[in-house]
Image (tube, rainbow, N blue to C red):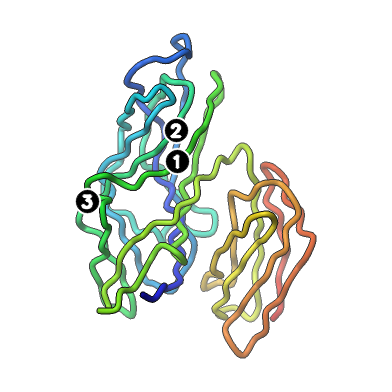
Amino acid sequence: MKKIPVVLGIMILLIGMVGCKKDSSNGASYPYSIRMTDGPGPYSAVNIDLQSVEVTGGDGSTVVLNVRSGIYNLLNFTNGLDTLIATGTLRVASVQQIRLILGPNNTVVANNITYPLSTPSAEQSGLKLQVNQTLQAGVEYAVLLDFDANKSIVQQGNGSYSLKPVIKTIEKAISGAISGSIAPVGTMAYVTATSNLSFSSNVNITGNFLMMGLAPGIYTVTVTPAVPFNPVTISNVNVAIGVTTSIGKITL
């Protein structure tokens, strides 16, 4: 099985939730939003057929969101762009899990050819994302679902494609980001930011990149371009909550 880099990332998909029953929140309501994002990659399109979004509260109740169902091309939401996919109000004070239900019309476009994108189990049991988030009354929460297509799109031995989602949930209120660009523009490159964990993205066709959802700390950023260029490493990149740290233009 051969993995194909792409940046699917983001998906971020949901926003707000409609509660089913109350827990110990004493009747309080919690505006909650979930959005979808992705990263640039080598495909022309990655189309996801979103049908439903459900949330499991801390009391075990199931919350069905008001979903903007339809087919989303994830590559329309890269390098800081995202889209709202569901809205509502949550009436339980914690979120354990987000579940995305996909329809059958998922496709990937590579080399101007459209291929069906198999999504095992996503049409029945759904794509399950563990959140384990505690909410506070009076705070509007936004969660971004970032699809890492470098790891999520898999080419099978027979030439078909399947989606095995690697999705990072980003709470904007407690994370930061790193941005930058490379030259010459048009060079394919892969970017990683490493601290205790490693995060990745691809450089888009205009030479820019953006890695979101990073915990505060000191990171080492490595740009790995296509041959004949050599990798470039930048150390001691500081990430702070709510701040996008720019490392400027990197000349290969």
Q: Which residue is mark 3?
A: 103
Identify the residue shown where x is 70% and y is 46%: 216
Q: Which residue is mark 1?
A: 130
Residue in the foreground of this view, choosing between 239 and 79: 239
In terms of image quadrants, where is residue 157? bottom left
Q: Amino acid at mark 2?
A: Gln
Specify the quadrant that holds the N terminus: bottom left
- Please state which of the two labelled residues, at mark 3 or mark 2, is closer to the viewer: 2
Identify the residue shown where x is 54% and y is 59%: 79
Secondary element under disc 1, as helix, strand or loop, is strand
Q: Residues within 10 Å of mark 3 (few under 14, many from 20)?
A: some
Q: Residues within 10 Å of mark 2 (few under 14, many from 20)?
A: some
Residue, far left: 104
Secondary element under disc 2, as helix, strand or loop, is strand
Label ID, residue 8: none
Say which label, 3 or 1, has the lower sequence index. Answer: 3
Q: Position of residue 72 (x, y in %)?
A: 32, 54
Q: Amino acid at mark 3?
A: Gly
Identify the residue shown where x is 47% and y is 9%: 26
Give yes or no for contact between labels 3 and 2 (Cβ–Cβ under 8 Å): no
In this picture, residue 186 sits left or right of residue 118: right
Q: Which residue is mark 2?
A: 96
Q: Position of residue 159 (x, y in %)?
A: 27, 78
